[in-house]
Structure formats: structure tokens, C-alpha cells
Amino acid sequence: MRKRFPRLLRWVAVGAVLGVAALVIPDSAVKSTEIELVKVQRADGVDLTPEVVWILAVGSDARPGEDMTRTRGDALQLVGMNTRTGAATAIGIPRDSWVPIPGYGSSRVNAALAYGGPQLLGRTVGDLVGIQPDYVFVTRFPYFEDMVNEIGGITVHNPRPFYDENLNRKGFKSGQVHLNGYGAMAFSRIRKSLPGGDFDRSANQQRVLRGIQARVRARAAVPGFIERGVLSVMAHMHTDLSPAELFRLAQATAHVVPSKITSCVVQGSIGNVGGASVVLPYVDQARRYGNEARQDATIERC
Amino acid sequence: MSKRVRRGSRALAATVGTALVATLVLGGCSGGDDDPGAGPDDGASASTDPGEPPAVETQVSFGKVTGTLGRPARDRLSTDVRSVVDGWLDAAYVEGDYPRTDFADAWPGFTRGARAEAKRDADLMSNQDLGADIDGVEPVGRALRIDVLAVKRKPVGVTAHVILKFDTTGGTQERVKVAGRLYLTREGGGWQVFGYDVTKGAI
């Protein structure tokens, strides 16, 4: 099969769209007086190569005026998507993970973005997990907020209440929480008030991804929704993917089945390097996640 | 579950076709974003021999056009996408020598991967489930609404909303509706289907 998406790291900024299209069947134009309710079968599929696509979704902490592809990556999620089965998985990488960065010794994983841009960050995370991403999506938080707003906000399941003096004083209650763009950004960034710190924050980022997926799923059948989404991505992200490639990728991600989404965060111990607190990631665990998910984008157990 | 089969007449076909277009248009699209003047494509009128049952033409319209696309480009796109969609509907459902069990060529215009997916879904993406039990298929309505992503005034992606209704004759007599979406991009100089989300069922 011709390789439509070469296994070459490219970068685009991300809305991190995961979703499945629910089909709207237009009303019948043929009326009958003997209507029977019958079972309607449904089939869906999307051709994307490779069948399991890996995307490193990066939230850059770039300040206004800074190049978001040359600052630190604040949120790191390696997302796999199986276009054959509709499964998807997210492997969260704590931002402060102390890892080897090719050509730069060892440092926090998020420094790879500043050192060598999206390609080096992709390679660094790929070396940790054992899966090299096909794409690296980089966005900055204001753009992320815009994109969440453009899809009408998202709903997440929050396991515990938490707040942050700077980002959200009122805090997030537990349970189902509706978030606008700013709320989704804050939910993804708050760390200090979480008992598990960086690990819990990474899990919250995955909850936001699930929320985005659910929203996209619900809206995918709306005429023009996917098309507008692609234009939004193009407007908010640096990309060298062609519009047609983005369109194919968006349609493919819209076919992910929510019940087939799994997610895990690479755990680790807290260490000290040169006086700085870092996470020493459990590399064996990261590799296990990678090995388990590589072929089918599914992790049975974290 | 069998249904009374109503045979098509020109008037019925025209009525059904018009109703289908109206349903599609009213069902969620209000014309292009950038050119409200681009209305439904009437399509060519059927060319049939006297005494032959009238062909049911695919009624084509535009839904959401995201980006800018001029009329000439719309016309070309309409023709191209209709050709791909009709190719599939004919090869998968309408044409062929029934009773029919061979549906290997039911997906012209699909990418290789999409064709492989469709083959796995052959009961829905073709008449494989019915083919052996019927001796004919008579289309009663077919419609196509095109959502477009246009960049720099060129179409780069299409969501094709498709409806086909047909009556089967023979051992199983029922009216069947196939409806859903096809996703297309240009591949190798022509538009090809790379994905789909389709339902099929008796109505």
C-alpha cells in the first residue's frame, strides 16, 4: 500500500482531536403506511497508513512572542490511534521526567523541545516509550483555549476537587465538569494542589483529551464540522501537513470509539539532580506500555 | 419484514428525487458559506429509450462549503464526486446480474485500504447480504449532498452525504435504504473514497 503518511516526524499544532462520527440518517423521503421498525446495520472505516498512527501531543509553555516549537513542552501525551479497530490510547509523560535527550545528555524531557524542536522531542519521548511518533503536534495554551471554545467546550469527569490560586481560585468540583477553553487549559495545567503532582496532572490532561474526543464525536456528523475543524487547526498551528492530509487525519480521529480509549501515565520516583527536583521515570513501565500498545493502540492495564 | 414493492414511474421517480433533495437540504444544510447562489445541481435528465423504465438520477446538492470555492470549481467537483459515488452505488447495489454473489468489484473509486475495509463490511457496503436471494434491484431514489473543505479556492476534502433507496425483487421483496457519509480526497489525480460511515436497512 502506498504510504500516504510517511513515517517521518512532522509537526503541527494540535487540537488533539479524537472522536467518532455518529451517523445522522436523513429522514426518509418515502412515506409508507406500513412502517416497520427494522434493525439498521452500520459500518464505518477509514483508510490511513499506518493503521496504528502515533501522535505526540505537546502543549508548549511559550509566552507571547516566543516560538512555541522552541520552548519547553509542558504537556506531553503520546496518543495512538488504531484506524482499523477504532481503539486509541494515551501514554502520559510527566513533564519533569529526567531522560536521555539524543545529542544533549540527560535533562528534563520537556527541554528537548527547546533544544531541538518537535522532532527531537518526538525522538526523545519515542526512545523512552519505544514508539516513535508519526506526528508531533505542538500548540500553545491560548490556541488550545481557542480550539476548545470553537467546539463549544468539553465535559470531563473529575475524580477529585482541586483548585489553584493563580489559574482557578474557585476550583473544579468533582464529578462531571463542563469546561470552556480557559477551564480546559487550567484543568490541564494545575499541578501543585494535586496529591500526585505531575502524575495527576498528566492524568487530567488525558481526561481533557477524552472530553475533546467526546465533543468531536457528538458533533462530527454536523455538516461542515470536521471541515471547519481542519481550518481551525491550520489557523492555530504550525504545520507542514497538507490540508488534505489534515482532513484525512481529522476524519480518522473522528472514528475512534470512546469505549475503546485507554490511558496510562508513566510513573516514577522523585529524584534530585543538581539541586533540582525531577521525576525519575520507570523506564520498564514506559516500555511495557509501548510494547502493549504498539500494534493495536490498546493498554489493558496500567 | 418483506414490504410491498412499489414500481417506479417517471413521476414517482421525480417526486422521490425532489423529496430526497429537499430532505437533504432541510436536514442540515443551508447552502455554502461563501456562495449562497450555489444551489442544487439539477443533474442531467435521464436518457431512456421508450418503453424502458426511467433511470433514477442522483440528485446532487452542496451542503457546507468551508472556505471559498467558485462556481466553476463547484461544477467540476460536483461532476467528479458524483461520478465516484455513482460508481460505488451502481457497482455495489444497483447493477450486476442478480441473483448475484460476486461483489469483489463493488468499490471502484475507493482507496486500497478503504476497499479492504469495505470488503470486511460487504454486507452493508454492498448487496452481499441480499444478492443471492433476489433477482433484481430497482432504485427508487438516490441523492448526494457535498460538504467541502476548500483551501486557496481549491477543494481538498469532501464529505459526501449519500442516500440510496431501492426495491428488491425475487425471493426477498423489500425497500432498502443505504445512507451515510463517504470521505474523499484527491488521490493520484482523481477523487477517491478513503473512509465511510454508512447504514443499511429495510424500511
Image (cartoon, coloured by chain):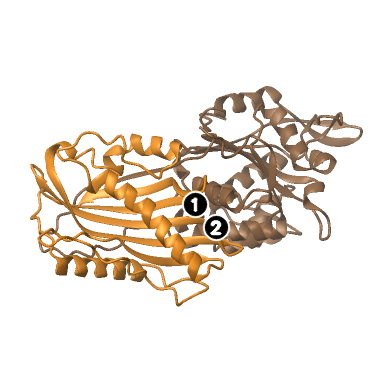
Chain colours: A brown, B orange
Q: Do the residues labelled 1 and 2 touch (CB within 8 Å)?
A: yes
Residue beneath disc 1: A214
Q: Quadrant of residue A23?
A: bottom left
Judging depth in this view, the residue of B107 and A82 nearest the camera is: B107
Residue at image position (45%, 36%) is: A84
Q: Quadrant of residue A28?
A: bottom left
Q: Quarter of the image containing the C terminus of chain A?
A: top right
Residue beneath disc 2: A154
Q: How far apart are marks 1 and 2 (CA)?
A: 8 Å
- Subunit under mark 1: A
Q: Which amino acid type is marked by label 1?
A: Ala
Judging depth in this view, the residue of A299 and A222 nearest the camera is: A222
In the visual, does A159 lie left or right of A202? left
Residue at image position (57%, 28%) is: A294
Please determine whether, in this image, residue A228 is positioned above or below residue A78: below
Residue A27 at x, y percent in the picture: 27, 63
Q: Name, please, the residue furthest toward the top.
A: A284
Residue A112 at x, y percent in the picture: 80, 38
Please determine whether, in this image, residue A283 is positioned above or below residue B86: above
Query: Could you say whether the residue bearing mark 2 is in a helix, strand or loop?
Result: strand
First in sequence, mark 1 or 2: give its number.
Answer: 2
Query: Could you say whether the residue bearing mark 1 is in a helix, strand or loop?
Result: helix
Q: Which amino acid type is marked by label 2?
A: Ile
Residue B53, numbered label: none
In the visual, does A177 lie left or right of A283? left
Q: Name, please, the residue furthest toward the bottom.
A: B37
Q: Residues within 10 Å of mark 2 (few under 14, many from 20)?
A: many
Q: How crowded is mark 1: few (under 14 residues within 10 Å), some or many (20 or more)?
A: many
Residue A201 at x, y percent in the picture: 68, 45
Residue at image position (17%, 61%) is: B54
Residue A170 at x, y percent in the picture: 66, 62
Q: Name, please, the residue furthest toward the front.
A: B49
